[in-house]
Image (cartoon, rainbow, N blue to C red):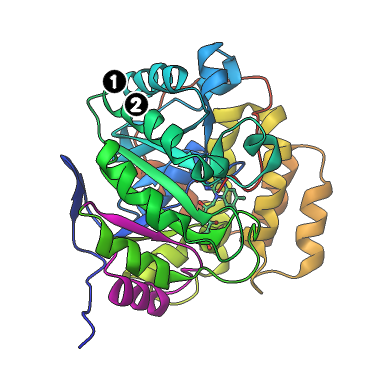
């Protein structure tokens, strides 16, 4: 009989207690603090930063260091690093720990050439000895648990993750996340979670299943058929935190327009505070489509927003379209804890499709 898993159960990676079996995926150009805090509010038990370059950390690049800001209401939080030099990775991991992350996550999944050509991301799956040296160096230099996120392998049909995964655990990984697509596949085809099930059998640490989890039914099927400890949700949560609540079994249908607009406005305000208005304006454009799409608002409305010159105009236009959002927004803002107000004035190094 298939086991039924309660997504609202807690579990743990080493000493880190994770309140639900739902993890918000790291996504470059998406997983800003506002996204992670929202994910926690909607029930993600663990959230993750986007991949952060260890070279950027090493050189104290201001933009990169901005990724290491942790808010009080994000915990538990993993900060993900990518790079290829074990010593530099270990040093960066110490900074990640000092910044307040509960877990250090290493990216062995990024399929983007700009990253793989430097010997980082998914390319490390083809050099397991080196991948293990990185994991050893990082795990022995921090006190927080280390997790690794990987693809199935580089080539289509690869089963490399099944060879490398157990070795990474031996080297010190306290958890593995598998996105069972090949790096070549990028985001095409389907995630083959039969590999996730095989990996679960091979290791004695928690495995997180990533890829194509878009609904409660799918989440439960993946948990039941793989034995994974948790599911990770990425694209389905873009501009759609309600998907997280639905997956947890806590949603009461599609959100109303007021709620959508209020969440978007809150997200805009938080992102402006985090990135500064200039950076936020460009960054937010893709989110307008994500929030207002899905049949929630007519297409021309979202096109109109993208063309507006300032954030103030966007806010005005949104509130005109859903005046009731005012009250919802006030309630949401009232419930949020304070965060440090730090502004950065440059664009992040954002690599689309980091894993
Ligand atoms: C825009 C985008 C950016 C991503 N960036 C990262 C990243 O920085 N690190 C990483 O490990 N995975 C990254 N991924 C992969 C996701 O974490 C996840 O494994 C993948 O999208 C499959 O899950 P999904 O079907 O729920 O989206 C990214 C994916 C997308 C769509």
Residue at the image position 38 percent from the left and 43 percent from the top:
148
Q: Position of residue 132 (x, y in %)?
A: 38, 35
The residue at 38%/75% (across/down) is 216
Q: Quadrant of residue 289?
A: bottom right
Observer-nearest of 339 and 189: 189
Q: Does dot 1 land on a helix, a strand or a loop?
A: loop
Q: At which x and y percent is residue 326?
A: 54, 52
Residue, x 60% and y 33% (percent of image)? 272
Q: Position of residue 344 (x, y in %)?
A: 60, 20
* Residue 197 sits in quarter: bottom left
Q: Residues within 10 Å of mark 2 (few under 14, many from 20)?
A: many
Q: Nearer the viewer, residue 323 or 109?
A: 109
Q: Nearer the viewer, residue 355 or 24?
A: 355
Q: Is 321 on the left-hand or right-hand side of 303? A: left
Vertical side of 242 occupied by 81: above or below: above
Residue lying furthest left in this view?
A: 15
The magenta region covers 205-228
Is any part of residue 324 visible from this angle? Answer: no
What residue sits right under mark 1 in the picture?
141
Q: Residue furthest top?
A: 59
The residue located at (44%, 74%) in the rendering is 215
Cα separation between marks 1 and 2: 5 Å
Q: Which residue is mark 2?
A: 138
Dividing the image into 4 quarters, which one contains the N terminus? bottom left
């Amino acid at each position: 009989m298939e086991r039924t898993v309660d997504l609202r159960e807690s579990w743990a990676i080493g000493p880190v207690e994770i309140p639900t079996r739902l993890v918000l995926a790291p996504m470059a150009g998406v997983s800003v603090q506002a996204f992670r805090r929202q994910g926690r509010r909607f029930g993600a038990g663990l959230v993750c930063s986007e991949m952060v370059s260890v070279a950027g950390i090493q050189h104290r690049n201001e933009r990169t260091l901005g990724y290491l800001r942790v808010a009080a209401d994000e915990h538990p939080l993993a900060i993900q690093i990518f790079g290829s030099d074990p010593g530099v990775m270990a040093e960066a991991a110490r900074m990640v720990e000092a910044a307040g992350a509960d877990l250090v996550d290493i990216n062995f999944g990024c399929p983007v050439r700009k990253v793989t050509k430097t010997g980082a991301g998914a390319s490390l799956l083809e050099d397991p000895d080196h991948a293990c040296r990185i994991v050893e160096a990082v795990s022995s230099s921090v006190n927080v648990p280390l997790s690794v996120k990987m693809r199935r392998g580089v080539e289509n049909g690869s089963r490399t993750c099944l060879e490398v995964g157990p070795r990474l655990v031996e080297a010190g990984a306290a958890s593995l996340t598998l996105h069972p697509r090949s790096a070549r596949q990028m985001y095409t085809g389907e995630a083959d979670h039969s590999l996730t099930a095989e990996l679960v059998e091979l290791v004695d640490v928690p495995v997180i299943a990533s890829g194509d989890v878009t609904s409660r039914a799918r989440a439960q099927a993946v948990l039941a058929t793989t034995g994974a400890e948790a599911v990770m949700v990425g694209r389905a949560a873009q501009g759609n935190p309600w998907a997280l609540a639905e997956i947890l079994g806590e949603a009461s249908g599609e959100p109303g327009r007021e709620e959508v607009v209020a969440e978007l406005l809150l997200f805009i305000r938080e992102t402006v505070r985090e990135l500064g208005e200039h950076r936020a304006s460009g960054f937010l454009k893709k989110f307008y489509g994500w929030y207002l799409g899905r049949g929630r608002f007519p297409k021309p409305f979202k096109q109109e927003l993208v063309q507006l010159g300032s954030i103030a105009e966007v806010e005005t236009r949104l509130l005109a379209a859903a005046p009731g959002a005012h009250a919802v927004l006030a309630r949401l803002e009232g419930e949020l804890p304070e965060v440090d107000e730090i502004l950065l004035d440059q664009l992040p190094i954002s690599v689309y499709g980091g894993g």
